[in-house]
Image (spheres, rainbow, N blue to C red):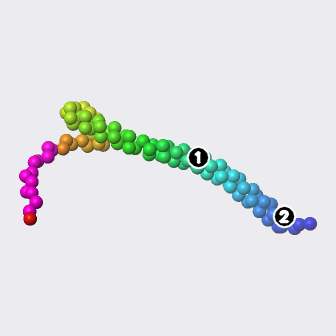
Amino acid sequence: MLKTWQYVTLIALGAVSLMLVVTNASLFASNRAQQGEINQRQVFLQQTQSLDGLYRDMVKGLAELAVRSNDRRVIDALAAQGINVTPNQPAVATADTGSKK
């Protein structure tokens, strides 16, 4: 037979073990949910990365068209998205000095 203090100690250890098992199970479930969310974000980023060049070309074409047609509304819309559009100054013709011997 167990003495009273041995019985109480075993019951306390069993309760602590049970609490640890429940905590482990809840952490496992929470971790799995977070891993699923992170995996979804990763897939989204991988899919949108391939579209980055297309988006860049679209914005470049839109900016070129806005500058060419001097469309202030489109330039303002691009600026609202954080894209600064400034027309290039025409190139200044420089005289070619030729090759010196």
Asked whether 42 falls inside the magenta stretch, the response is no
Q: Quadrant of residue 81?
A: top left
Crowd tier of the residue under label 1, counting other residues whose Cα lies within 10 Å: few below 14, some 14–19, many 20 or above: few
At x 21% / y 35%, what residue is drawn? 68
Q: CA distance from mark 1 to mark 2?
A: 44 Å
| Front residue of 89 and 3 | 89
Q: Which residue is mark 2?
A: 7
Location of residue 30 in the rendering, given as x and y in whole percent from the top left corner: 62, 49
Give the side of residue 47 with respect to residue 22, left or right. Answer: left
Give the side of residue 7 with respect to residue 64, left or right. Answer: right
Q: Which mark is residue 36?
A: 1
Crowd tier of the residue under label 2, counting other residues whose Cα lies within 10 Å: few below 14, some 14–19, many 20 or above: few
Q: Amino acid at mark 2?
A: Tyr
Give the side of residue 37 with respect to residue 87, left or right. Answer: right
Q: Amino acid at mark 1?
A: Gly
Location of residue 44 in the rendering, given as x and y in whole percent from the top left corner: 49, 43
At x 47% / y 46%, what residue is drawn? 45
